[in-house]
């Protein structure tokens, strides 16, 4: 976890430095405020990790007593949230950041404080939307692509290939595959083959021949109802472990919210950077929750 923390601090600093400098290790070379300033990989995976990094800083803030350390953590929380909302084109990041923080608040604070805190998060979200050009652009793009895909699907046209439109189309066609073979699925590794039968046009076959960009649908398509319930069982096991430890519960539940959010719009356990992150972190959080102290030990307690 210390290694992850140090790595994310490096990425965060690089994100802001890339506003003024062309960094040799940065994926994008966009200068100036706004636009996409992804440092490594792509904005989806970077923002998923940055969302969890934000939660990690919030979690650490509740444990630290040093004023200077808390000040640095507050700066890190604000900076990481701004990097996701203002310096990235990743709509997945907007979703996972909101879900992660909302879950952390719900499982960390009493009900009344949770409602107040969630209201403040909502207000901050509205402010970010009204002041972030990249966020507005991506929202408008998603809205237009969604309207277009359903219009073309209803008229029987071959849909235009767009980011959000492609997801809707892959989900619709994959659900058709599930309906044809719901119990056993089509077999591991079958999605690409069956998808290209459903969408034989070269550009559509190429974009969906690996994953339907939804982990729930992915498991259901290939492994049927048992695969789908296996994934639900995994999530239930993580929630059970999180609930068993009051100290790690908010952080763990925030991570689970990020995991579910990403799984709804991406194949979270297929993409290499994503599944490496999720599997390593869920193992670390599970072990921390199940095998560490479940209550806070006073600092003046005798051993």
Image: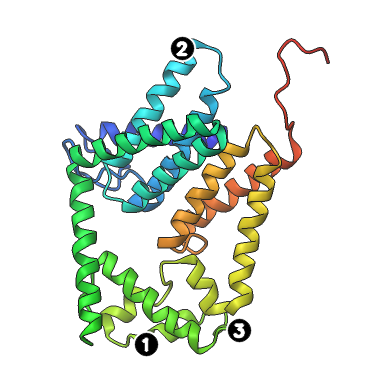
Of residue 90 and residue 109, the one placed in the foreground of this image is: 109
Residue at position x 19%, y 72% in the image: 148
Q: Position of residue 22 (x, y in %)?
A: 22, 38
Left or right, 248 with respect to 30, comes to: right
* 180 sits to left or right of 295: left
**Residue 251 appearing in the image:** yes
Q: Mark 1: which secondary structure?
A: helix
Give x and y (percent) for residue 5: 50, 33
Give the residue drawn at x 27%, y 69%: 165
* Residue that carries the numbered disc 2 in the rendered image: 68
Task: Give whichever of discs 2 and 3 has the lower sequence position.
Answer: 2
The one of 198 and 130 positioned closer to us in this rendering: 130
Q: Mark 1, residues whose alpha carbon is within 10 Å: few (<14), some, or many (≥20)? A: some
Callout 2–callout 1 Cβ contact below 8 Å = no
The residue that disc 1 covers is: 198
**Tag 2 and tag 3, C-beta contact below 8 Å:** no
What residue is disc 3 on?
A: 183
Return the disc, 2 or 1, that comes first in the chain's sequence.
2
Residue 33 image-quadrant placement: top left
Q: Which mark is residue 99?
A: none
Mark with earlier residue (1, 3): 3
Badge 3 crowding class, 10 Å Cα cut-off, few under 14, some 14 to 19, many 20 or more, is some
The answer to whether 290 is drawn above or below residue 147 in the figure is: above
- Residue 7 visible in rendering: no
Distance from the alpha carbon under mark 2 to that under mark 3? 57 Å
Is residue 20 found left or right of 118 in the rendered image? Answer: left
Point out the frontmost of discs 2 and 3: 3
């Amino acid at each position: 976890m210390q290694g992850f923390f140090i790595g994310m601090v490096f990425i965060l600093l690089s994100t802001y430095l890339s506003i003024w400098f062309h960094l040799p290790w940065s994926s994008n070379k966009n200068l100036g405020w706004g636009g996409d300033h992804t440092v490594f990989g792509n904005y989806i995976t970077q923002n998923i990790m940055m969302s969890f990094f934000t939660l990690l800083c919030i979690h650490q803030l509740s444990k630290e007593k040093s004023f200077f350390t808390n000040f640095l953590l507050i700066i890190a929380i604000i900076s990481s949230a701004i990097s996701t909302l203002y310096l990235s084109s990743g709509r997945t990041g907007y979703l996972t950041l909101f879900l992660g923080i909302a879950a952390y608040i719900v499982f960390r604070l009493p009900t009344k404080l949770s409602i107040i805190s969630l209201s403040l998060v909502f207000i901050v979200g509205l402010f970010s939307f009204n002041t972030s050009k990249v966020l507005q652009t991506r929202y408008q793009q998603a809205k237009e692509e969604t309207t277009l895909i359903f219009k073309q699907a209803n008229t029987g046209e071959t849909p235009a290939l767009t980011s959000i439109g492609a997801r809707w189309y892959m989900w619709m066609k994959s659900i058709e595959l599930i309906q044809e073979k719901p119990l056993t699925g089509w077999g591991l590794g079958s999605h690409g083959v069956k998808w290209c039968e459903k969408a034989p046009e070269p550009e559509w076959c190429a974009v969906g021949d690996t994953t339907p960009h939804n982990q729930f649908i992915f498991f259901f398509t290939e492994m049927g109802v048992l695969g789908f319930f296996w994934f639900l069982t995994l999530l239930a096991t993580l929630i059970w472990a999180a609930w068993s430890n009051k100290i790690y519960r908010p952080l763990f539940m925030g991570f689970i919210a990020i995991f579910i959010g990403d799984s709804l719009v991406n194949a979270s356990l297929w993409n290499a950077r994503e599944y490496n992150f999720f599997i390593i972190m869920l193992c670390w959080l599970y072990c921390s929750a199940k095998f560490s102290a479940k209550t806070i030990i006073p600092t003046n307690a005798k051993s």
